[in-house]
Amino acid sequence: MALYPSQEWCDKWKDALNNDPAVAESGKNWGVGFKGSLVFEVSPGSGLEKTHYIFLDAKEGKCLESKMMDDAVSLDPGFYVTGSYGDFKLVVKGEKDFIEMVVRGALKLKGDMGKIMRNAKFVRAVANSISSFPNEYLGE
Amino acid sequence: MSGFMGKILRVDLTNRSVTEEPLPRGDASLLLGGCGLATKYLYQELKPGIEPLGPDNKLIFMTGPLTGTLSPSSGKYNAVTKSPLTGLWGQSGSGGKWGRELKRSGYDGIIIEGISEKPVYLIIENGKAAFKDAAGLWGKNVFDTTTILEQQLGKGFCIACIGTGGENLVRYAAIMNERHRALGRGGFGAVMGSKKLKAIAVKGDLKIPIFDQDAFGAAAKVASDFISESLLKMTLEVYGTSMVLDLVNVKGGLPTRNWQSGVCTYADLINAPSLNEKILVGRKACYACPIACGRLVDIKTGKYAIKGEGPEYESIGTFGSMCDINDIEAITYAHILCNDYGLDTVSAGSTIAFAMECYEKGILNKKNTGGKEILFGDTDTMVDLVHRIASRDGVGDLLAEGTRRMAEQLGGGSERFAMNVKGMELPAYDCRATKITGLAYVTANRGGDHITAYVQGPTFLDIPFLIVEENTIDDVTKENPLEAKVVKNMEDALTTFDALGACKFMGMALMAEDIVPVINSATGWNLDVAGFRLAGERIFNLARAFNVREGVSRKDDTLPKRLLEDPLPDGPAAGLTVDLEPLLDAYYGYRGWDKQTGIPTPEKLRELGLDFVIDKLGE
């Protein structure tokens, strides 16, 4: 079991993504002609003491990089997701659907929403992969 | 002419006659069909200043070249008339299957004129039209009328009809097809009621000619696949249109207590997950729609037990937060009642919310309500008022006139919070939270309306429309005149869907480059993307010209004073109002309209091929 958030957790997520046929199939066009990288900015609460950032880079159905960072200043990702640790935990645990959380405004997704519109299956596959392996959590 | 049936049916109710006319092909190619073509008829055949509920008004139903085809979400038809609510260009569109049946019955559209001496209904089937006596239907509501006609006429007929709301000339009465699909906004039901036309039953199995079937099939499949794999389907299918409620509320723009606040503290009781959990039993799609955003609901027990379709987001916003009602069952009950009576839920809910605030401020009181208390948050009063509006009973007679006329009658400063533009009640998005939405409200030709431009996409929802070039809003809380162009772009692009006979939601997931091949392969036209956008601009300007001829100018393109002068008191948009004038100046500039008057210039009208309206606007 990996602690969310940690670099170990990021590594496991990368493995999960690259072993998921749904990600490979639905992501064939992801990152082609546009930046397919995402930054998740997770704000404190529910056991998390300070803001953390996870950088995920994906292209053509493959995860190229998944890493935990102290800040996002040097990054220029294609997409940016913000939310509280409590809300992210619900998604990582599989208790809430990522898209539902975005639709309800609990998580905020910024970037070229046209790309999200056209690649929604990939977004969902990536989100589903988050809860596909067991984790431990801060504050529990 | 491919994509069209080639015939228009003209129905004279005064003389009980029907005649056929050829489709004006030149106009169809310039104005695409649907609301574009219908608006040209309306412009040419109506004299300015006529009474909307009198014999000189016309009610024009029109399909588009994609209606009834395999293009995605192509069940739409449009109607235009002179609106009894606004006194201006009235336009409304509806989904379901009625449009397809009308087209396959052999007619692209119907022009209804005159007034029948007695109640009648119309049957149209495979190139034949006939009048029938509707005395036995008059006084019945939509669900009963539809059931009776379905039983009498047999399988396959689609029914569009009015309920008692239309018979009683409620100024925002709707025409309902297939019970729950609505030509909702602007009072089309009242116009039909004034003509003593109870229903139109359509059925057809004629083939719609397609210019290049193989190319059309391929282009339609590409478009359909984009929709099927989109975020649009993923969200609307699961949550329906009420998915937007939370997004609007978190930006502080969910009108609450008749727009006295933009924050609804009980949103989680009336939002999409709540609806899904408590009352949703299924989903329903319009013709050829891969999404199925329609909600089938069933409230099994209690005083609001009812079964039917809906509510949409707008009904939840108007009957819910605007009336300060936190009961999704009561909201749903009021929504379905409106469908049965044939009432527009946006205007009905908004008008009730307005009455509640008038009562709160003492402008309405027991003396002028017939002893009735009208309190925010009172579910039974809300439901009771829907009944009274439809029958014009007691205070319902006043509410049946809509907020503008109510405020004129009541006075007492109530016009400040009569939340309408040009007489049309506003939908459930407070433009103080996203400023550009206010511009879209005042420039919509049919009055305060959310789907002419649907600028809520890039503002409240953070979802752009791919069909529109340049529709990004940088900071929704600021008035940026450069972004007035976004409203123009969205109005033009989305107007084309009303002309083509397709759902505007397609514009979220399809680019112009996706839809143009569908149009061309259906019709044989050689539209390019620029021509596609220009067609939308042409239709929009023609509708504006209709309104200008009725006396509209810049002075009418304005918001209720509450939105211009009263800051939102709380939430993320606290302290904000709308500074409209700089946005209007910029908008008129992008439109090529005179900045002083808001009237399209002769140069712009010539550029759009609308030379025939130039002299009329000068008169």
Image (cartoon, rainbow, N blue to C red):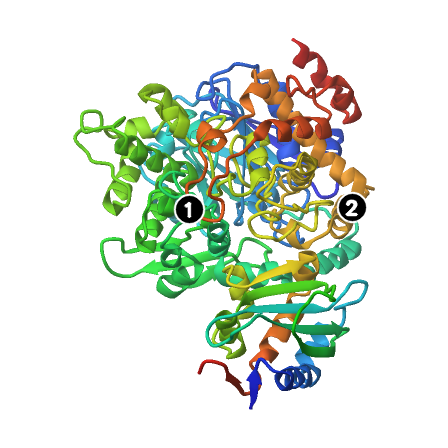
Which residue does the image show at 74% across and 50% down from the upper left? B518
Q: Amino acid at mark 2?
A: Asn
Give a yes or no on whether discs 1 and 2 share a subunit: yes
Farthest bottom residue?
A1
The numbered mark 1 sits on a residue in which chain? Answer: B
Where A1 falls versus B203 (above or below)? Answer: below
Q: Position of residue B375 (x, y in %)?
A: 25, 39
Is the Cβ of the residue at disc 1 closer than 8 Å to that at disc 2? Answer: no
Q: Nearer the viewer, mark 1 or mark 2?
A: 1
User: Residue at position x 67%, y 71% from top?
Assistant: A122
* SS for callout 2: helix
As measured in the structure, the alpha-carbon distance from the residue carrying label 1 to the one carrying label 2 is 39 Å
- Image quadrant for the C terminus of chain B? top right
Where does the N terminus of chain B fall, quadrant-wise?
A: top right
The residue marked by circle 2 belongs to what chain? B
Q: Is residue B118 visible?
A: no
| Residue B521 in the figure: left or right of residue B487 | right
Q: Which kind of residue does numbered mark 1 sit on?
A: Gly
Q: Is residue B484 above or below residue A32?
A: above
**Residue at 68% of width from left, 20% of height from top?**
B595
Left or right for B76, reference B377: right
Callout 1 secondary element: helix
Outermost residue to the top: B619
> Residue B146: percent from the left, percent from the top?
39, 45
- Badge 2: how crowded within 10 Å, few (<14), some, or many (20+)? many
Q: Describe residue B468's horizontal placement relative to residue B393 as left or right.
A: right
> Mark on residue A83?
none
Q: Which mark is first along the chain, 2 or 1?
A: 1
Return the mark for residue B317. Answer: 1
The numbered dot on residue B520 is: 2
Quadrant of the image occupied by residue A30: bottom right
